[in-house]
Amino acid sequence: MLKIEDLRERLNTNVDAKRNSRFEVAFRSLGYQDEYCRYHYEQYHKEYKLFLSAMAGELDGKEIQNPQCYRVAFEANCFSFFRALHSLIESIPYLLNLLIEINDDAESRHVNWGCIINSHASSTFSDGVAKIKALRASDSYQELEHIANVSKHRRIVRIDSGIFSENKSAQFCSEDFDKQFRSYQLGELMETIYDDLHPKALDIIKSFVL
């Protein structure tokens, strides 16, 4: 397990208190974002089941009977999951910069993956940089980035509830995206992308520590 003590040992001994404080906050934020992902994943499945039951008229005893309420809930948790995971992944360059001090301005908008790759880290931490490049080239990263960017900055991608499909599985409408995905089923996408990127992200951080 990655611990903050392991990372703190890599910090410049002359680092100021403010930078040290932000480093600790950034590290703990990874855990919070991970918890958000798990929460939204569980809530997505819970609300989707309630939606199917509401559509079938099987919600006896529930105060809310309107299927649309549950549809809004499961869609909102779906998008929140992907945005939380995207935030987790994209916050790593910020953490790495606090760790190895590439840019003196920790809050600079130029602190990103390119900042790490094009710095002295490319030679000092060649293994970590290679892992960053592999992560960014992966299908999971590119799909996650596309989902997050489209849903945050362009439009809410339409979701087919799957109510009339044979396997009762909600999925994104593929025509709303500008790239081909391996799957458009929401549950499968969440699991595949998370299971692929989460361990790779932690491995990248470790590569700049060990």
Image (cartoon, grey):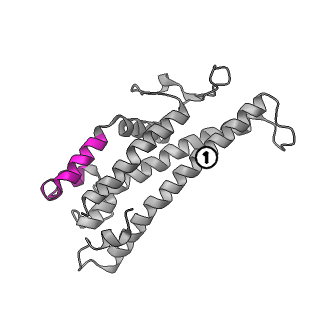
Q: Does 127 lie within the magenta span?
A: yes
The residue wearing badge 1 is 42
Name the spot of residue 181 as percent of width and height, x first: 42, 27
Q: In this view, does 159 lie above or below 103?
A: above
Residue 72 position within the rendered picture, expressed as x and y whole percent measured from the top left: 66, 38
Residue at the farthest left position: 123
Which residue is pictured at 37% across the width and 69% down the height?
4
- Who's the residue at 34% across and 56% down the image? 92
Which portion, as a residue range, is magenta? 114-136
Q: Quadrant of the C terminus?
A: bottom left
Mark 1: few, some, or many residues within 10 Å (few <14, many ≥20)? some
Q: Is residue 73 above or below residue 184?
A: below
Among the 4 quarters of the image, the one containing residue 56: top right
Figure quadrant of residue 16 = bottom left
Left or right of 169, for residue 104? left
Query: Residue 3's spot in the image, x, y percent?
Result: 38, 67
Q: In which quarter of the image is the N terminus?
A: bottom left
Question: Disc count in the image?
Answer: 1
Q: Which amino acid does label 1 sit on?
A: Glu
Q: Residue at x 12, y 55 (%)?
A: 123
Query: Would you say residue 107 sits in the magenta stretch?
Result: no
**Relative to the observer, which residue lies in front, 3 or 30?**
3
